[in-house]
Structures are given as C-alpha cells and as structure tokens.
C-alpha cells in the first residue's frame, strides 16, 4: 500500500468514478490508475468499487470505509508537511483562497492588501467560482479555505465560521420608474424582467423565497455568477438587477440608481469554510482575523476541534 494509491482512489471518487477524468486531472494514465486501484484492492482483500463491466459505478460498503480512512490519511500527511513549513519558514509559503467573484472583487481587496503587507513572502492564489466550487476546493485541499455564503454548510467535511451579514440592492438605469417608488416592493419589482445571480449563487434562495411568499413569479431573464456581468446587462436595459449590497457603490456606479432592498429579503451570512482536521499555519489564522475580526485563533481552534459549525453571529 502506498500514498499514490490513496490519492488515486480519492481522485477517482471526486471525479464521479470517471477514471479518464481522474487521470487527466492528475496528469497520469488511465491504465496506471486502474492498475494501482486493483493492487490496493488485492492488498486489502476487499473490493472497493462497484463495477459494471469496465466502468466504475460506485463504492462498495468496505470501499466507503476505505475512502474515509484514505481521506483522513492524506489530510494528516498534508498536516505533517504544513507543520514542517510552519517551523522552517513561518512567514512564507503558498496560501490559496477559493471564493466567489463578489467576495474577490468587492470585499477581499483591503484585507488582501493588509495581509500582503504583513506577510510579503506569502504567495496568494485566489480561485473564483460559485459557492459549491469554492467548497469543493476546500474539501479536496486545493484551497486552504473557502469564503462564500450558502453552499459551505452543505459539506459535512467543512467546519464553517460566520464572518458578516449582508443583504441586497436593486439597481436600475437612472430615471427608471422603480427609482420613484417608496418604499420599494416586491410587487413593483416583479413587473419587470430581472437579472440576478445564478441558482447556485450568493443568497439566491432568499430571493426566490421572498417572491414565493408573496405568491409572485418573477421573470428572471438572465443569471450570472459575476456582479459586474449583472450590471452590464442592466445598463443595456435588459432588466432590473438584484445583487449583493457590497457590489454596489454610488460613486463607482453612477450610471445606476441603487435602491435598498434589505427590507424585502432575509439577510445572508458570509462564512469561511475550513476542512475538518486541517492544520492551519499562523498566517492563515491572521488572515481569518483580518477578514472577520471577531474570529481569533482560539475561536477558530475551538470550531475545528469541536465542530461548532452552527455558531452564529
């Protein structure tokens, strides 16, 4: 048994049992993965995968147990590497953040600026995607942490910590009829075509729930994962935009009337997601504290040790 076999096993499962996709993702050959998995099964004396011909269709009961142990083993191996890095080079290394466009574009810049001044030798990588993609990268270890809103809590492998609450604004071209309605209502918004976030994205469920509670069926003509894309199509006159408040700025977005909609929708909470059992380097704790000042090292450690992922602001 070797670590390569465990990595192959986990990658095949992560790729929905598609060996070709797994081989491509880790730059190896499909026959090589198949051979190593067979060797692992022979050594353990159990069948790990359910097979339909040459195709893998799922995990057997012992395969589920083997997968869980393999994932823990790889996490601990990564922790060993991090411990070595921590004490050999405390202020340098790589730090990968998986997050959404809204966080990366509108929230993170001042935090990243402060962090980079504090740790100039740390190489920062920001991976953008939807919340589910951010969570998956944190779970797989591709990212040190994930920052998003809704999807993080759906992953049992993650401990999530609340950072801040936010709500939404409606943007319309200047002079639009909605700009004259006080107070703004869902009924008034529903009369127009709507441009908002993708279904997997930033608080979209709160938007849907608010309209549904009023018995309204909004006409969503376009969805995007990028707040700037939403703004572009609102500016073209294709509809009114519903987006996160932090993505709106009166000075920067002068072409729009920005309407407060916080009274219409339930608030959302941005969270940090950390893989259970992970060893965090000092600069990761410091980044978390910069992003969410109420999250000190003690509270982060308590969450990781006790799994207090339901802690609220």
Image (cartoon, rainbow, N blue to C red):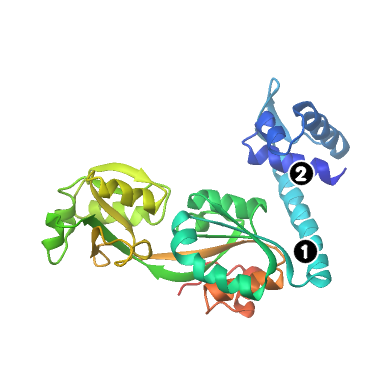
Using a 10 Å C-alpha cutoff, classify the residue at mark 2 as few (fewer than 14 neighbours), some (14 to 19) or many (20 or more).
some
Viewer-side residue, 7 vs 128: 128
Residue 236, compared with residue 164, is above or below; it is: above
Residue 9: percent from left, percent from top: 74, 40
Element type where label 2 sits in the image: helix
Q: Is residue 190 left or right of residue 252?
A: left
Report which residue position mark 1 lands on: 82
The residue lying at 32 percent from left, 48 percent from top is 232
Viewer-side residue, 256 vs 284: 256
Residue 216: percent from left, percent from top: 19, 49
Residue 246: percent from left, percent from top: 38, 65
Task: Kindly identify which numbered label has been placed on residue 145.
Answer: none
Q: Which corner quadrant holds the C terminus?
A: bottom left
The residue lying at 60 percent from left, 72 percent from top is 115
First in sequence: mark 2 or mark 1?
2
Q: Which corner quadrant holds the N terminus?
A: top right
Residue 201: percent from left, percent from top: 42, 51
Residue 129, compared with residue 255, is above or below; it is: above
Report which residue position mark 2 lands on: 7
Q: Is residue 137 visible?
A: yes
Element type where label 1 sits in the image: helix
Q: Quadrant of residue 156?
A: bottom right
The residue lying at 85 percent from left, 39 percent from top is 44
Viewer-side residue, 227 vs 305: 227
Q: Is residue 267 left or right of residue 299?
A: left
């Amino acid at each position: 048994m070797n670590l390569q076999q465990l990595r192959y096993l986990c990658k095949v499962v992560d790729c929905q049992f598609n060996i070709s996709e797994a081989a491509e993702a880790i730059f190896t050959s499909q026959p090589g993965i198949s051979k190593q998995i067979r060797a692992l099964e022979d050594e353990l004396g159990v069948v790990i995968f359910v097979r339909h011909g040459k195709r893998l269709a799922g995990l057997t009961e012992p395969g589920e147990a083997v997968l869980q142990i393999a994932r823990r083993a790889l996490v601990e191996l990564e922790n060993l590497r991090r411990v070595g890095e921590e004490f050999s080079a405390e202020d340098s290394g790589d730090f990968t953040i998986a997050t959404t466009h809204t966080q990366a574009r509108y929230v993170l810049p001042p935090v990243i600026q402060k962090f980079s001044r504090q740790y100039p030798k740390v190489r920062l990588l920001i991976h953008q995607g939807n919340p589910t993609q951010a969570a998956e990268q944190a779970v797989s270890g591709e990212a040190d942490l994930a920052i998003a809103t809704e999807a993080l809590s759906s992953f049992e492998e993650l401990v999530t910590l609340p950072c801040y609450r936010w709500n939404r604004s409606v943007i319309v071209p200047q002079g639009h009829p909605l700009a004259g309605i006080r107070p703004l209502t869902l009924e008034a918004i529903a009369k127009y075509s709507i441009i908002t976030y993708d279904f997997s994205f930033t608080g979209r469920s709160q938007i849907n729930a608010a309209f549904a509670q009023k018995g309204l069926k909004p006409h969503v003509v376009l969805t995007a994962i990028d707040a700037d894309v939403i703004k572009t199509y609102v500016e073209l006159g294709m509809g009114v935009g519903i987006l996160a408040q932090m993505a709106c700025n009166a000075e920067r977005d002068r072409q729009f009337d920005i309407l407060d909609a916080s009274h219409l929708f339930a608030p959302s909470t941005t969270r940090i997601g950390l893989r259970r059992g992970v060893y965090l380097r000092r600069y990761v704790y410091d980044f978390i504290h910069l992003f969410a000042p109420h999250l000190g090292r003690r509270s982060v450690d308590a969450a990781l040790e006790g799994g207090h992922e339901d802690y609220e602001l």
